[in-house]
Amino acid sequence: MRYRKRKSGIPLAIELPIKGAGLPSETGAWAQKKKKKGFLHELVHNRILFLMLLPTLLFFLVNSYFPMVGVYYAFTQFDFNSGLFDAPFVGLKNFEFLWKSGTLVKLTLNTIGYNLAFILLGNVLAIVCAILLSELRIKWFKKLTQSIMFLPYFVSFVILSVIVYNVFNYDNGFLNTLLAQFGAGPVDVYNKPSAWIFLIILFYLWKNLGYSMVIYLASITGISEEYYEAAKIDGAHIFQRIWYITVPMLKSTFIVLLLFSLGSIMKGQFDLFYQLIGNNGVLYNTTDILDTYVFRSLKVTFDVGMATAAGLYQSLFGFILIMTVNYIIRKINDDYALF
């Protein structure tokens, strides 16, 4: 680097070195040396970080990737008397049986229908509750309300099933006891399949609304107060501030949670359905999902091939769905896509 000086000795300008004259360029020896550093160099250089990553890698290898070998059973007529890989190969007959029996269509519609209701109603109600809580100015009442709404999330599904049974039991449940006090006849809720469509959605929202609300409430807390102050100066009332500031700011959070939820849309809330419905075959037509069907296939009939076929279909359908939705979102707005 050279200076051009005036006669007084004060630097007039700085002449930067020309590319290639003295310093290596991006395409020179320095860049070539940089390109030679591959994965082994990174592994040695950051060995502590990779060592910290090792437990996570082992967890996914043992619990997610190694069990994928069991996908082979979806194409076999599994027999416990034979070895693991000695079962007769039947091709797509397990899938064909599921399709022709109508079981696969019914299970798919039930699983997707319930999960769509969980996702849409759950997120909309969580946003509404989070906005209402954020507008509260009494701190102790705000904290108390948030704690009460979050408390059902810690209630196990076993406890929930006991509560539901004591409410809707035909003989001495709370509902029929209350109806008898008013002179009305008892209602056999456990023999009404259509009623459980709304009951399952209701109990899911009751249990998970508080958890979802906290996520949106955290996003609202991160919104700068300058937006609301500027809106107040312009004369915007509270509903205008919510609609034009809060709701648009929550759009990115909503889309990310939506994508995560769609990734598991074919995996129903097994604990919820199994604990509330149990082995009540009267309610299977409207409450049976893929997870409960797979569980019963293994528990009752020990049909490993049929259960694996249903599980494989469940995973492939969910994978295709999340890839499709993520592709559409990336085309609309790349900032909101997961990858």
Image: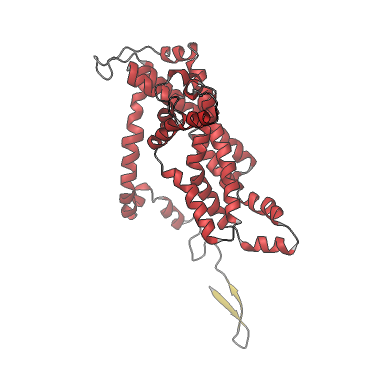
Frontmost residue, 267 versus 73: 267
* Residue for point 48% across, 20% down: 191
Frontmost residue, 124 versus 26: 124
Instruction: Judge from the rendering whether residue 39 lies leftward or rightward of residue 107; answer left or right.
Output: left
Give residue 85's position: percent from left, percent from top: 28, 18
Q: Is residue 156 above or below residue 242?
A: above
Q: Is any atom of residue 169 visible in this view? A: yes
- Number of residue marks: 0
Frontmost residue, 26 versus 204: 204
* Residue for point 36% across, 28% down: 68
Q: Is residue 11 above or below residue 267?
A: below
Give residue 268's position: percent from left, percent from top: 46, 30
Q: Is any atom of residue 321 visible in this view? A: no
Give residue 203's position: percent from left, percent from top: 49, 35
Farthest residue to the bottom: give it: 8
Frontmost residue, 67 versus 216: 216
* Residue for point 59% across, 42% down: 124
Q: Is residue 4 above or below residue 23?
A: below
Give residue 248's position: percent from left, percent from top: 65, 49
* Residue for point 53% across, 54% down: 218
Q: Is residue 198 above or below residue 77?
A: below
Render colour scheme: secondary structure
